[in-house]
Image (cartoon, helix red, strand yellow):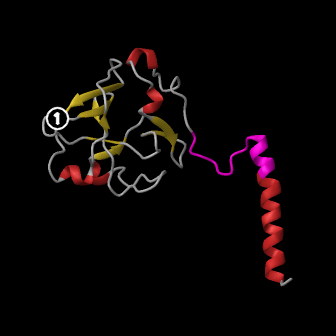
Amino acid sequence: MKQGYVFTAVVVALVAVFGGMWFAAGIPLFEPPAVISDRALGLDAAAVGFSVPTAFRSVTDADGIPYLTDTRGIALYTTTLAKCTGDCLRIWPPYYADVSVSDGDRVGTVRRTDTGQLQYTWNGQLLYYFNEDKAIGDTKGDRVNNAWFLARP
């Protein structure tokens, strides 16, 4: 047997043995972003009429400061601009909702007059994505033009 094949066989055997042990022990092979519980966010699924985990997650940035994401882990943003319509929406797509929700203060939806779709709000501010955030953990839209900011719980 050539050395390359022996090395490959050893690596495959080690992965099989240790991977099986990790799987049996319930240890993840990668560390997902830190998720803060919905209770820590002050959200009550019964009060808002939908399962809060299906709409938002809260993860921490490199400084340990929490920010909101959608369920896939993609960052959400708020803005100080009066409106985001037309070309703005190509850069900052809205975080659309399937159903109207409200918990009074934190989670809500509004119907956009330009598209007619429901858009999520957080603390009364519309929520958007940034089109340059391509992966979980990307926060490239934070502080863009000093008008766009990560949504913070």
Q: Is residue 97 above or below residue 94?
A: above
Based on the picture, tell me whether residue 28 belongs to the magenta stretch: yes
Quadrant into which the N terminus falls:
bottom right
Q: Is residue 3 left or right of residue 81?
A: right
Magenta region, residue range: 20-34
Q: Secondary structure at mark 1?
A: loop
Q: Position of residue 53 (x, y in %)?
A: 47, 30
Quadrant into which the C terminus falls:
top left
In the foreground, 100 or 1: 1
Q: Is residue 20 left or right of residue 31?
A: right
Q: Is residue 107 above or below residue 56?
A: above
Q: Position of residue 50 (x, y in %)?
A: 40, 22
Number of callouts? 1
User: Disc 1 designates what residue?
Assistant: 116
- Kindly identify the residue that appears in the image at 20 percent across and 42 percent down: 81
What residue occupies the far front of the structure in this picture?
1
In the foreground, 85 or 80: 85
In the foreground, 92 or 67: 92
Q: Is residue 101 left or right of residue 62?
A: left
What residue occupies the far bottom of the structure in this picture?
2
Q: Is residue 55 above or below residue 13?
A: above
